[in-house]
Amino acid sequence: MSTFTLSNPIQFLALGFGSGLAPKAPGTFGTLAAVPLFVFASLLPYHMLVVLTVLISLSGIYICGYTAKAVGVDDHPAIVWDEIAGFFITMLFTPVSWLSLAVGFALFRLFDIAKPWPISIADKKLHGGLGIMLDDILAGFAAALVMYFIF
């Protein structure tokens, strides 16, 4: 097992620009890092925001898989690129406001931590980059669905 290297650009992304190195609740800190990124990205035309969200999600399969393999831990808690993708998905269908960001943050963390069915199946059965990403992608869609009805 090796250690994380923030000088490696792939690991830097996987660690949420360093936010995943928080000693407690790295997933929460990774999601917090996603908030200003999403706010900035929401200034793009909507179709570009959708493309960016898809790119973040698909590239995460490689980014997270590469980093997990490099450190020798399948889903190390410090790998938080999946939280960034999940938060982007959560917010994708809701107008951006401080209230929607706060509710989206809370809902995404709830679904990501509780892992209700089918999120729990993806978390338990899949490994590598796809396994790391898919449970958070599903949590993002679950939170987005709730957000749709709230907003």
Image (cartoon, rainbow, N blue to C red):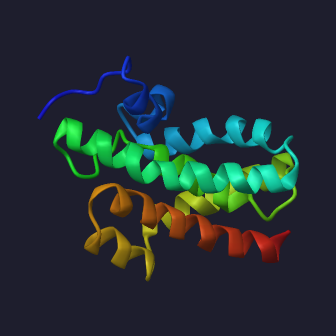
Q: Residue at x 51, y 40 (%)?
A: 30
Q: Quadrant of the N terminus?
A: top left
Q: Residue at x 65, y 60 (%)?
A: 89
Residue 53 percent location from the top left of the image? 65, 53
Image-based side of 72 in relation to 101, left or right: left
Residue 117 percent location from the top left of the image? 43, 82
Depth order, front residue of 100/2: 2
Q: Residue at x 44, y 81 (%)?
A: 118
Can you see residue 103?
A: no
Image-based side of 17 in relation to 50, left or right: left
With respect to residue 36, does 62 lie above or below? below
Depth order, front residue of 75/105: 75
Image-based side of 20 in relation to 146, left or right: left
Can you see residue 6?
A: yes
Image-based side of 143 in relation to 132, left or right: right
Return the residue found at the far bottom. Answer: 117
With respect to residue 130, does 59 lie above or below? above
Residue 52 percent location from the top left of the image? 68, 48
Residue 115 percent location from the top left of the image? 43, 71
